[in-house]
Image (tube, grey):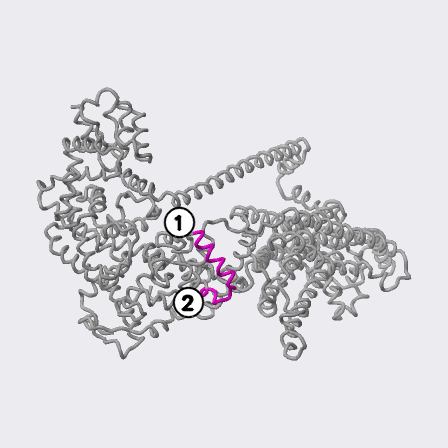
Amino acid sequence: MDDGDNKKKKTNGRGAPGKGGGRARGRRTSPVSEDEDDEEDTPPRPRRAGERRRAARKEGDEDEDDNKASKKKRGGAANRRRGGDGEGGDGKKGRKGRGKKGGKGGKGEEKGDSTGKEKDKDEDKDKKKKKGSSSDSNSGSEEEDSMSEGEMARLMEEVEEKKKLIATMRNKPWRMKRRLVLLKDAQQFVDKFEGALGKGKGRKWFAYKVMMTKKWIKFQRDFDNFKTSCIPWERKIKEVESHFGSSVASYFIFLRWMYGMNLVLFGFTFGLVVIPEVLMGLPYGSIPRKTVPRPEQDTAQDYSVLMDFNGYCKYSVLFYGYYNDQRTIGLLKFRLPLSYLLVGIGNFGYSLMLVIRTMAKNADVGGGDGDESEFTFAWKMFTSWDYLIGNAETADNKYASITTSFKESIVDEQENQKDENIHLRRFLRVLANFMITCSLGGSGYLIYFVVKRSQEFANRDDLSWYEKNELEIIMSLLGLVCPPLFETIAELEDYHPRIALKWQLGRIFALFLGNLYTFLFALFDEVNSKLEEEQDIKNNSIWIMKEYYANFSRLTNDTEATPPPMNPADVIRGPCWETAVGIEFVKLTVSDIQVTYLTILIGDFARAMIVRFLNYCWCWDLEAGFPSYGEFDISGNVLGLVFNQGMIWMGAFYAPGLVGINVLRLLSSMYYQCWAVMATNVPHERVFKASKSNNFYMGLLLLVLFLSLLPVVYTIMSLPPSFDCGPFSGRLKMFDVIMETIDLDLPAFMGTLFSYAANPGLIIPAVLLMVLAIYYLNAVSEAYKNSNNELKKKMQLARDEEKNRRNNTDSTNQVMKDLEDLLPNRSFIPPPPPPPPKAEKPQPEAKPTKTKPGSAAKGVKVQKDVALASPNPNARGPVSQAPTPRAGPRPGRGAPAN
Amino acid sequence: MGNKQTIFTAEQLDAYQVGSLCFVINTSSLFILIQKLFYRYRDLAPQLVPLDYTNHPDVKLPYELIGSMPELKDNPFRQRIAEVFSEDGEGNMTLDDFLDMFSVLSEMAPRDLKAYYAFKIYDFNSDDFICKSDLEKTLNKLTRNELTDDEVRMVCEKVIDEADLDNDGRLSLEDFQHMIVRAPEFLSRRKPNNITYILIWF
């Protein structure tokens, strides 16, 4: 039978390639029912194991088949040659031949499906004969007595083939000329015969589909571009990234993220607190807390006073003290004190939620440092150029970014390859950590010591300038000396720069915590003294008020008449510690801004200017030698940002305006620093890739958030608010506002509900439940992580194995290829019929494995499974044909049963 | 803009449609598209290209003109692109080659086709394999010679190490395809900073 097939091939003038062509043919199922968009729905075809990928996408599938066909057509050469040269005529012939044969093959199979009982028997014999060999078993299914079929079917098939060729021509890597020739040919053929067959209706629908797909893709792309252009500063950041690497860019991305978050905080604060107060609250000068006191009025507008946020600044909406304690303001009955408290808490809630969500999302993205993909460098090499770039500036940036990214990967790779004396390195790392711990401890103690001393100094008057400013001086000295020291020590450790950056961040963070600690310490001292002072003034002012009224009634001798209210500027008022704290934070923030900007201006810009222009008249090379240009200090900038945000969180409750200032700062900082880094800095010596998730920054931010949450919550919960300023004046505690609202505004049952909810009997179980939930989730995530790692390992293993197999077993590979070619066919051809009648009755289960013992792939497995599931031999068969069990598809089975 | 008979015959148009630019389906938009392309082609050298293409004039535009097109002039591989698509291999293009090039570079072109041509573009010495020297050339073009020799060597070794499946020290088309179809960016060029398209008529 095989011989017959081959002969036929020869008569068709094709010879060797017949095998491939035959296979392609054999798989064509019921061609009559298929329209010409069948190229989209062609059933999956068998593939050579090694030579083709398995395409996931339909499109890929489609043109893969075509490529394959064209390859076979060329005689199964292992490597596809360039399509163009000198193959035009040949290819054409091949095509034609294939088309014709396709007609026969397809028809033959049809026949086999529907009627070929004996034929199937024959085929089975054939199979048995060639059991274990790798030859083309499929040829059996092409057993052709096609000549008995009419010319019609053949023609139809041929036309199909031609149409398919036309439709898929664009996928072929041929020269236009050749395409045109081929096309003309094919089209003529189709025109000639199609009319007779009355086909070609699906064209419009196909056209419509393609058009819609195209439009959809275009729309998606436009939309994506639109979305990208909506991301603020994307271009700026990309530009920085292309020149300085992703590590520097990660700072700017962090900055942008901060800006977004602060914008929301700003929206809350201004929308719910500041603007209602401005629009609906009492105007300036109406009550004492909104008026500059008389003794200060002369200097209230001086520049120096305003710069210290005293004078008019102090008595403005920027600060806590300005707000009135009226329960509701304006026509809308806006509950300002309640809103003030809720916004204060809500800011923290929102920030916490956002930070944690971002962290979780980042962890989801991968979190892994560096990408572990198979083809890092190859992809970089072949896919990094963007063929859409059409302007010189973009192209320059692209060159820079490609170079940078190559350098980043090279650094990573070098790190991977490095394996020197591991013991020495470990020792050095331990040593470095020891030294840094020592210096951290030392500076911690120094700070502690200085704070103690300053408390002593506070009680003395005869202080020298140094003694007055000792704390600040020491702190800034530490901030100046320690980071470079740490960096020098970190050289010992010889970490990858990305990891080194993390260590550096962590260490400087620990150092700065000292800063924070002293600051808070001083602040609480101040608050406590203010509170004492306030107590005195409170009594005092009540007394004065009484006296005022007494005097008034004594002077007018009229106890009935109400005295005119005192001029608000004259009223004695307390120190209002909240405003004082707020001012402190605002001052700190502003001075921080000034210092940062000045540092950039002097440390980077001036330095760059000097290096650049003095280089012409200097005795050594300034650019390459000592001062050189500055590098962008990632750790310092990130920590600056993080601590600044801490200040904002702490201060925002006492100075609502602080959020606005911060938004301005971040905004200007974005532009300023982008400019500065591009204009004055040089890339790091070893440009390194930032870790994909900047969760480390987020972690620091979370820590700072927590640290700044504590003092604010403490003051809200435990300190009494000032008696004469701020939205909570006159109440014992700030959160009394909530109680008040519950009592007065909400229905009574809500009050009882809340009192139940506050019951310890309820709270303790709730806490326990939460702990349990945390424990459970933790365990689950641990398990997931484990299985994840396991899978990763397996994938790695499989990859290695595949590569090894490809490398080593070229000869066996050939066999495997052929086998794999054969196997998937089985789901499309009739199932292997049983061996001649005698083998039939006794052992039906064992057969399927016997039919193809040499093959170890899935085709057999499928059959085996089915066989096991249904011991009845008649019910056996490939799954694809199960739905119509009694009809044609299994003639082989049917025959013996009869 | 004249009617289509002045430039192409209807059959020619039809042939172009299915031959390469079959993403455009109805004849009117096909006509517009081919006309646009034709005028792009002709604008490169109005004195060389006749307005009448019905009798298949044999016109070639030299590489200097092709390479100066805005779509290509900033591309480091423009010479290779022109060479690969031109029939004579020197970058001189006929209208057919020109249409060919744009149809392959268009976004609707199938992935395998793109991969095939990408392979040819990167195969500088046209020996059907991407070998070390090709890689070095590619890398130097991509980075404008800014990497040191050591780095270039290392990167090339890594690339071969990663993508060479049959261990013959060079990349065959199969290796290349195997590698490239896994690349996330290969087909979807939707990187954020691309606002410009090479295919302005789409």
The mark found on residue B165 in the picture is 1
Magenta run includes residue B143: yes
Image position, residue A312 (x, y; %): 73, 65
Q: Residue at x 77, y 55 (%)?
A: A576
Q: Chain of mark 2?
A: B
Q: Report crowding for label 2: few under 14, some 14 to 19, many 20 or more residues within 10 A (C-alpha).
A: some
What span is colored magenta in the figure?
A: B140-162
* Residue A888 in which image quadrant: top left
What is the CA distance from the residue labelled 1 to the residue labelled 2?
A: 28 Å
Report if residue B6 is visible in the image. yes
Name the main secondary structure of what is drawn in magenta.
helix
Q: Nearer the viewer, mark 1 or mark 2?
A: 1
* Residue A88 in which image quadrant: bottom left
Circle 2 is placed at which residue position? B76
Q: Residue at x 15, y 55 (%)?
A: A190
Q: Chain of mark 1?
A: B
Report if residue A323 is visible in the image. no
Q: Amino acid at mark 1?
A: Leu
Vertical comparison of A839 with A161: above or below: above
Image position, residue A138 (x, y; %): 22, 39
Q: Are marks 1 and 2 on the same chain?
A: yes
Verify CB contact (< 8 Å) between mark 1 and mark 2.
no
The mark found on residue A282 in the picture is none
Residue A884 appears left or right of B67: left
* Residue A294 in which image quadrant: bottom right
Residue A523 appears left or right of B138: right
Q: Nearer the viewer, residue B145 or A163?
A: B145
Q: Amino acid at mark 2?
A: Pro
Asked which secondary structure carries label 1, the reply is loop
Image position, residue B45 (x, y; %): 30, 77
